[in-house]
Image (cartoon, rainbow, N blue to C red):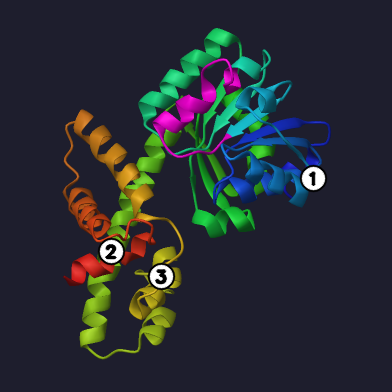
Amino acid sequence: MKRGLEMENIKIAFIGLGVMGYPMAGHLSKSGGSITVYNRTYEKAERWANEFSGHAAKTPAEAAAGADFVCVCVGNDNDVRSVIYGSDGVLAGMSAGAVLIDHTTTSALLAEELARACEEQGVHFIDAPVSGGQAGAENGVLTVMCGGEEEIFNQALPVVDCYAKQVQLMGSAGQGQRCKMVNQVCIAGVLNGLSEALLLAEKADLNISKVVDTLKHGAAGSWQMANRLETMAKGEFDFGFAVDWMRKDLSICIEQARAYGVELKMAQDVDQHYAALQQQGLGRMDTSVLVKAIAG
């Protein structure tokens, strides 16, 4: 039984009902807690409230009012700031002692900024980017990388555990985001390798289904191979984690690495391939569409 199922009498706000946030908030609704959601498009928040057991708020501050935990899952650094600050922002509604959990993939600098802003207001902060994509969110099996104080992490764990398979505290505020950067660089490398491997397999006239069934059990196995190689071979990309979002994430990775004096050559190459795909109007396609750029 998940720890998240023991949360009776806990009040939670969830900010952002995109392809990830909508199902994540849905899992929280089954936890026994009281859930209030906010989305930039209010009609979507109303639809969620009708589908699940919860309430829709018209501002982030209204959603956060009286909440023990406030979860945020939006687009980028600027989107986070837009729902956190100001008279209608989350911080305007949060009570002392409450915990802000940011699931957005952002820069580590923003995570550190939010930790300071929360401390000044007497609330707590955890940066908690997720991996696992839309399917992971819908099935409640996300991997969550956290940064913050251990005591606050332990308080937040029952909430996060409602939609996670693996949750790990990586260190102080910002370290969760830095771990997510490592994750995204790994994904870029795997997809780059799978793209080249697929080209070789097709030239060799190999049965791709048999390739996947065989190799996924060995050293070359990965989630991407098991779930994407066959769809790549079929030219199916209208699903999953979009190129637009991956480019946002890779820019964060590359910038952070440069701050350390590290050059991520492969990540930069993949990023440029994705830039070319965006110019072809493929920015909303799954990241596995990289194979089109590799194939030339």
Labels 3 and 1: the sequence-earlier one: 1
Q: What stretch is highlighted in magenta?
A: 72-91
- Label 1: few (<14), some or many (≥20) within 10 Å? some
Q: Quick check: 214 above or below 45?
A: below
Instruction: Please tell me how crowded label 2 is: few (under 14), some (14-19), or many (20+) other residues with Cα within 10 Å.
Output: many
Instruction: Tell me the kind of residue under disc 3.
Output: Arg
Residue 81: say if magenta.
yes
In what element is the residue under mark 2?
helix
Looking at numbered disc 1 in the image, what kind of residue is underneath it?
Answer: Ser
Q: Is mark 1 on a helix, strand or loop?
A: loop
Hey, which quadrant is residue 242 in on the image?
bottom left
The answer to whether residue 3 is left or right of residue 22 is right
Question: Foreground residue, 230 or 82?
Answer: 82
Marks 2/3: CA–CA distance: 11 Å
The residue beneath circle 3 is: 228
Classify mark 3: residues with Cα within 10 Å, few (<14), some (14-19) or many (20+). many
Name the residue carrying label 1.
53
Q: Where is residue 217 in the image (x, y as percent from the top left)?
A: 44, 74
| Residue type for callout 2 | Leu
Viewer-nearest of discs 2 and 3: 2
The residue under the point 83% across, 31% down is 9
The residue that appears at 40% across and 79% down in the rendered structure is 212
* Image spot of residue 35 (x, y percent): 74, 36
